[in-house]
Amino acid sequence: MKVVVVGAGRTGFLIAKWLSMNHEVTVIDRNRRILDEIEYMLDVLAVSGDATLPETLGRANVGEADYLVTTTDNDQTNMIVSALSKTMGNPFTIARVKRMEYLNVWGHGREILGVDLMVCAVPLVAEGIVGVVDFPELTFFRRLYGSVYVAISPIKPENLWSFEIGGKNIIIATKKMVETSFKRTNAGRILILGGGGIGKLVAKMLSAKGKTVKLVEGDAEKTAEELDGVTIIKGDAFSDFLWSEENLSEADAAIVAFDRDEECLFASAIARESGIERVFSVVHRSSRMGLFEKLGVIPFSPELETAGRITAAVRGNAVLGVVTRPEFQAYALSGDDSWRAFRNTGAAAQGWKAHTP
């Protein structure tokens, strides 16, 4: 199967890495230096140039591709390249977007945008955080397929099947089995630092669950118009005065969702230092997730969520669902209701045997 990946950033690199193990992959990017590094590390073909130009897509043989995946940092570029590729062949087009507005439009008129599948990390990360916020013994809890979920915990459950990687217990079981095996509490007071797309969606989802949500944001007026039932605090999330004046440390859990990892790391450290035990943070560079974990912070990576969802789609109808973490990938396979997990290290993935929960 031939796959063309447009954009050699961190997300594009992960997708190319995982897919090149089983498929013929071509990567397009404007930066020749980055392409040289990717060709050195991966078994892929690199094409340098502007993917919005037919000439560049022609050199990448897009007309013969089965899949075209666009992962640049510009949403409009990703959609333009997807539409353009349809004039050169008939690849299944997958576009990564950062803004929810495009995802909502695509849902009502997919054929207009030339995108067969649009993937946005905002709802994926938000759902991941919301799903685990009330389980203090879990650091991850996500649906794999149907009623089967993947959970991660430092505690090894006696009554559930699990495997261990680096001190973490990976559990694959039905949702009901996980919920009855681990303690559940009501984190009623939630603090959110950063009012970007992920922070706003998490605030909206948790508020709808009846939780008391405070969101600290610099542009409070605009954010307040979008979020009913959420207390919007205008101010600097790094200000000692604000933390004291607004009693921010009284929260049961904190979610950090700034656009830069440096801000997320510092704000997470402040939240932990203030006494908040459950702190979740967006981590844009997935290779830095370990730094957050050393602080006792639970990280969620937009690039991992995006890359995992896209690679599952390319693998075809045999894959019903996928969950991706730095250490492993778990796939739900059609046919026999089984799953298979792979360690994300080495030139080839190391597999665990199929298992039915």
Image (spheres, rainbow, N blue to C red):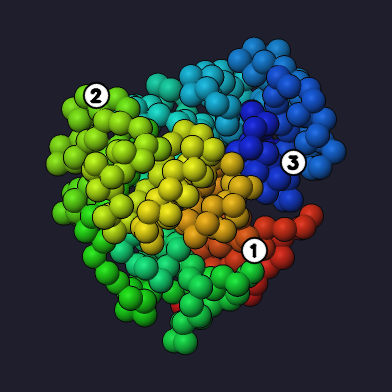
- Reading the image, the residue beneath label 3 is 24
Any mark on residue 222, and which?
2
Where does residue 120 sit, x and y in percent of width and height?
Answer: 44, 37
Q: Residue at x 42, y 60 (%)?
A: 142
- Reading the image, the residue beneath label 1 is 342
- How far apart are the two marked residues, 2 and 3, measured between alpha carbons? 46 Å
Q: Locate residue 344: give its quadrant.
A: bottom right
Q: Residue at x 65, y 32 (%)?
A: 9
Q: Is residue 324 left or right of residue 65?
A: left
Circle 1 crowding by C-alpha within 10 Å: few under 14, some 14–19, many from 20:
some
Q: Nearer the viewer, residue 153 or 86?
A: 153
Where does residue 44 sit, x and y in percent of width and height?
Answer: 78, 38
Q: Reading the chain from its start, which is encountered first: label 1 or label 2?
A: 2
Q: Residue at x 63, y 60 (%)?
A: 327
Q: Reading the chain from its start, which is encountered first: label 2 or label 3?
A: 3
Q: Nearer the viewer, residue 188 or 151?
A: 188
Q: Nearer the viewer, residue 170 or 191?
A: 191
Number of the front mark, 3 or 1: 1
What kind of residue is marked 1? Phe
Quadrant in which the N terminus is drawn: top right
- How far apart are the two marked residues, 3 and 1, measured between alpha carbons? 20 Å
Circle 2 crowding by C-alpha within 10 Å: few under 14, some 14–19, many from 20:
few
